Image (tube, rainbow, N blue to C red):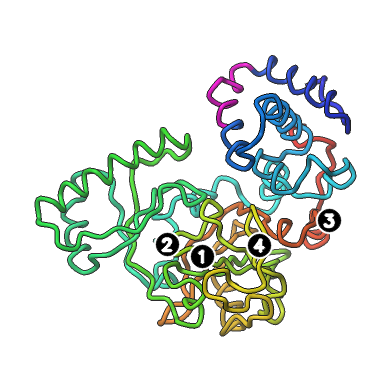
């Protein structure tokens, strides 16, 4: 990787990227490059073919110099930032090194695998979850659907809401339920191929969360949860840069793919202190569908949530950072899931790199110029 160097000249960035792609032909296959182009055109549908090729090359350069994915490259507007500005951001590849400092990587599966996480936090989930791996699990699935005819299906070890969807077997005959089950398992295999992520040929099937009205009102179709990162330093749990995830457009899933709004929360007070900001598009002080005010909203039972999050974090002694997703159900706060290395999305809605803030909190910093060193 002797060809990697810092430059703010786009032509030099493209030249370096071409050298990298040539050197790493096995990785930068046509399919990988097409995935990069597809993401860029998804964000910039009117981009010309020439501009698209330039942008793809520049994003490859940024991956090796700053450790950012194509998504982060665009989310953080790196194309229009200086080197000094860009190096203040915590990007994916850099973030993983900080996670490795804070946590035992061998135990990451405790969160990556959704069913393993459920086994640890069964009481905190406050709902029934089953694992479906093969046709032998159909009796368990069938009994589950008698109790919960509507449910959520999640691939066991995929992230980013990939393959997650709400489903039901209402009105289906026993034979149709069996066909639904077989199709559900087949879809998991297709998702592995489509997203090129995950290894488990299984899904978890979850009882729906009966969301408290205080948060449901923002977008009744979705579970409008709280992403609450916990950071353990010297045995103490810190609540760090939480945010409100608010669905839009009647979508069930809260994900960037569906334009979910991210609104920062003051960790001390539980008051939302930024507008709702999607990864792409304008920020909103009021929900675009329901008109409810976002900025200034008080998350209910905040102290209770912080205490609950602290208890959850302490149940994972070898994992120092977790990006928790919590929902306020009618039974109280419950765990939706825990993310081993969840995105630092506050850099999007706070509009600045915050690597130093995190370094100051944990008392450690990376001493290499490039993440791959």
The picture quadrant where one finds residue 351 is bottom right
Dot in front, 4 or 3: 4
Q: Which residue is mark 1?
A: 247
Marker count (numbered): 4
Residue name at image x 67 percent, y 50 percent = 99
- Mark 4 or 1 closer to N-term? 1
> Where is mark 3, residue-wise?
356
Crowdedness of circle 4 by 10 Å Cα count: few (<14), some, many (20+)? many
Residue highlighted by disc 4: 277
Q: Residues within 10 Å of mark 3 (few under 14, many from 20)?
A: some
Q: Who comes first in sequence, dot 3 or dot 2? A: 2
Q: Position of residue 218 (x, y in %)?
A: 52, 74
* SS at badge 2: loop
Residue 267: quadrant of the picture: bottom right
SS label for mark 1: loop
Determine contact: label 1, label 2, CB under 8 Å: yes
Task: Report how far apart the C-alphas of labels 3 and 2 lie in the structure.
Answer: 35 Å
Tell me the distance, in whole angstroms, between the alpha carbons under discs 1 and 2: 7 Å
Q: Earlier in the sequence, mark 1 or mark 2?
A: 1
SS at mark 4 in the image: loop
x, y percent for residue 5: 86, 27
Q: Is residue 314 visible?
A: no
Camera-nearest residue between 78 and 43: 43
State left or right for residue 296 relative to residue 164. right
Q: Residue at x 86, y 47 (%)?
A: 85
Assess whether residue 30 is covered by the magenta stretch: yes
Q: Is residue 191 above or below residue 302?
A: above
Segment colored magenta: 25-35
Q: CA distance from mark 4 to mark 1?
A: 11 Å
């Amino acid at each position: 990787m002797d060809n990697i160097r810092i430059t703010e000249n786009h032509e030099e960035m493209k030249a370096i990227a071409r050298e990298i792609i040539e050197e790493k032909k096995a990785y930068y296959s046509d399919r990988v490059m097409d995935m990069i182009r597809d993401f860029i055109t998804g964000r910039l549908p009117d981009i010309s073919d020439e501009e698209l090729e330039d942008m793809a090359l520049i994003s490859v350069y940024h991956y090796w110099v700053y450790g950012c994915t194509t998504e982060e490259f665009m989310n953080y507007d790196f194309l229009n930032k200086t080197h000094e500005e860009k190096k203040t951001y915590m990007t994916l590849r850099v973030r993983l090194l900080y996670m490795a400092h804070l946590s035992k990587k061998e135990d990451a599966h405790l969160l990556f695998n959704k069913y393993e996480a459920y086994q640890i936090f069964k009481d905190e989930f406050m709902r029934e979850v089953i694992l479906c791996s093969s046709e032998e699990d159909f009796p368990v699935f069938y009994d589950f659907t008698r109790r919960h005819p509507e449910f959520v299906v999640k691939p066991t070890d995929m992230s980013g809401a990939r393959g997650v969807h709400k489903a039901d077997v209402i009105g289906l005959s026993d034979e149709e339920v069996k066909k639904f089950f077989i199709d559900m398992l087949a879809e998991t295999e297709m998702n592995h191929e489509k997203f090129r992520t995950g290894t488990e040929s299984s899904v978890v099937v979850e009882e729906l969360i009966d969301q408290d009205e205080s948060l449901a009102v923002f977008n009744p179709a979705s579970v409008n949860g709280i992403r609450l990162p916990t950071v353990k330093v010297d045995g103490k749990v810190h609540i760090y840069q939480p945010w409100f995830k608010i669905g839009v457009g009647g979508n069930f899933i809260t994900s960037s793919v569906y334009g979910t709004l991210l609104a920062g929360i003051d960790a001390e007070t539980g008051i939302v202190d930024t507008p709702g900001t999607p990864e792409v598009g304008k920020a909103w002080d009021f929900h675009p569908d329901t008109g409810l005010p976002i900025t200034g909203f008080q998350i209910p039972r905040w102290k209770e949530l912080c205490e609950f999050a602290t208890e959850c974090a302490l149940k994972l002694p070898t994992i120092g950072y977790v990006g928790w997703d919590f929902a306020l159900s009618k039974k109280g706060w419950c765990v939706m899931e825990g993310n081993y290395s969840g995105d630092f999305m506050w850099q999007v809605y706070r509009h600045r790199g915050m690597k130093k803030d995190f370094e100051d909190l944990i008392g450690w910093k990376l001493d290499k110029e490039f993440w791959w060193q």
